[in-house]
Every structure is written in C-alpha cells, then in structure tokens.
Amino acid sequence: MYSPQRKLVFGTMPVSLWAAIILVTLPLHMCVAHGPLQVGHYAFSCPSAESIVRRAMERSMQQDRSIVAGVLRLHFHDCFVEGCDGSVLLDGPGSEKTASPNLSLRGFEVVDAAKADLEAQCPGVVSCADILAFAARDAVELSGGLGWPVRAGRLDGRVSIAAQADADIPDPSNTVSQNAEVFARKGLSKSDMIVLSGAHTIGHAHCDSVASRLYPVPEPGLSEELAARLMASCPPQGSSATMNLDSTTPARFDNNYYTNIINHRGLLHSDQALFTDISTRGEVIFNSLLAAPWTFQFSRVMIQMGNIQVKTGQSEGEIRRNCRFIN
C-alpha cells in the first residue's frame, strides 16, 4: 500500500556536485549555449555579475526569508508574458505589474538592488532579465534547493501590457487541462507543469486565491480540516491574510508539496487538482517519494523555461539602465 509518509532519499550530495551533474548529463545545447544565450555570458564583460546578484539575494533574505518565493514567482510571471525579458519589472499605467495576477508580486527590490550594484561595477552590461534569472536560481539554492547553470544574454523588452498578463498567467482556480494548455503555449509539457508546480513548496497565497474553494459552499473533496482553517483566515467578506502554500516545511525548498496534496492539504485548487486528476496523479506520487529526481527535473525545466521567447537581437530589446523604465 502506498504511504505518503514514506520517502526515498538519494543521500546528501552537495548542491555544487548536483549542479555539475546537470552540466554533464544535460545535452550540450541545453547547458552551454542556445543560440546567443550561454552559461558564462558575462565572464569577460562583467566577471562578478552572478556573485553580485547572489549577494543582493542574500541581503534581502537576511531581512525577509519569504522574499525567496517572491523572486521565484517573479521570474515565472516574467517568462510567461512576452518571454523572459524583464517586462514584468516595468512601471507605468497599464503595465504587467497592474494586471490582476501580478498585484501581489514581490521581489522587485532585489532586482533593483542588484542592478544598482551592477551599474556601479559594469555599467550598461547586465540586463534586468538576466538579473532576474540569476536571482531566481539563487533563491532556490539559498533555501535548500538545487541550483542550475543559468544561460544568459537576454535583452530587456520594451513592451509591458497588463492584458497579456491577464491572458497568459495560469489561474489558481484552473483545472489541470486548462493549466496544461497554458503551459503548452509556452512550449512546456504537462510533466513540466507538474514539476514547476513544486515551487509551491515555498511561499504564501492570499485569501482571494482560495475564496472560490470556500464560498458559497466548500469545494467537493476539500478536507473538513483544511476548509475550517481556511475559513477562519478568509471570511466571506474577504481578508488580506496570507497562508503558507506548504504547511509542513514552508521555508525549505523540498518535495513536501507533493506529499501535502496527496494528503489533501493542497492550498490552491490548481495544486490539489494535480492529485485529483488521474492523468497527473502518478507523477505527483512519484515526486513525493523521490526527492532527488524531482529536484533535478525542477532545475532542468527552469533552464528550459528561462529560454521562453528570449530577446537577443538589438532590434528586439535593450539593456536597461533602470529596470523599472525603458531607456
């Protein structure tokens, strides 16, 4: 009989060694270069670029560890709209920031701080899109996850439209098939979707993300214990309260997310649906049992996601001097 508490662990291999394994085992086109993108892109133009971004991430985490999930989510939302081009970072009326799915985004200050440091060291060299990609990797590593070699060389986009974010960001109330369609439009498979959903092992959700599961009547299949806990935090009239997406190890990047949804503790409808839906249940169970393979797959898919619709030609984008505004 399957027991969600039983886990197989691949030992305690150092993160640096796992990163080396990714470099060795991934196809060459995935780990070294993909067109103009390449690992070590700033090796000569700004050798300390990645370490500067990492220090900015570390400083932010010292003040607020929850910023980890904010930065990772920021990278997701950037790549799913206009590609990984930093368009989500732009200020202005009608920009992606003003779209409903993006109103709760956090982590902009991490990018701003890293950009300021980089401009002092290597002015006009490192794009905001690459800063966000580096910071997302660092956020995972610094919270106990496995990093990955970030291919860089993205340019920053000049377009940011709220309506595109409303259309392209997966909704927490979506079914598996609805989310799979959204991911497919970005060149990601259903398996990739399941793997990336594991990022909900860290972070919080707001009441408006779970209200549809509670009112006017609790969602079928929602456990009485979870329904009662959510209703206490999120009354019908609404609330600004937030809840941990992973109620067991909310600050650590691990695979407990999958165990939680097997035990009917998935906070969002789209999370719990991965176990309810027979087409995705098997992979959820597998990911809950085997921590190391899921961690490896997460790194692989993050590399793939980081290549969505990247802009590399000078006619396509620029290197912003300030991440919140086009030059």
Image (spheres, rainbow, N blue to C red):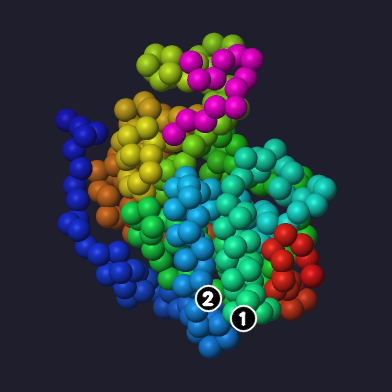
Residue found at x 45% / y 60%: 58
Q: Nearer the viewer, residue 100 or 308?
A: 100
Give the residue at the far top of this rendering: 217
Residue found at x 38% / y 57%: 142
Residue found at x 50% / y 83%: 47
Magenta stretch: give its range: 232-244
Q: Quadrant of the N terminus?
A: top left
Residue denoted by label 1: 122
State the CA–CA distance, disc 2 to disc 1. Answer: 8 Å
Q: Nearer the viewer, residue 251 or 185?
A: 251
Circle 1 SS class? loop
Instruction: Point out residue 260 in the picture as x, y percentages from the top left corner.
Output: 34, 33
Of the image marks 2 and 1, the number of the one nearer the N terminus = 2
Instruction: Point out residue 298 in the picture as x, y percentages from the top left corner.
Output: 40, 55
Q: Residues within 10 Å of mark 1 (few under 14, many from 20)?
A: some
Report which quarter residue 133 is drawn in.
Answer: bottom right
Report which quarter residue 81 is drawn in.
Answer: bottom right
Q: Residues within 10 Å of mark 2 (few under 14, many from 20)?
A: many
- Please state if 249 lies on the left or on the right of 8 as rendered: right
Give the residue at the far right of this rendering: 93
- In the rendered structure, are the residues bearing label 2 and label 1 in contact, judged by CB atoms less than 8 Å apart? yes
Circle 2 SS class? helix
Residue found at x 42% / y 30%: 266
* 50 is within the stretch colored magenta: no
Q: Quadrant of the C terminus?
A: bottom right
Instruction: Point out residue 200 in the picture as x, y percentages from the top left corner.
Output: 44, 42
Instruction: Point out residue 205 in the picture as x, y percentages from the top left corner.
Output: 52, 34
Report which quarter residue 315 is drawn in.
Answer: bottom right
* Residue 307 against residue 217 in the figure, above or below: below
Residue denoted by label 2: 49
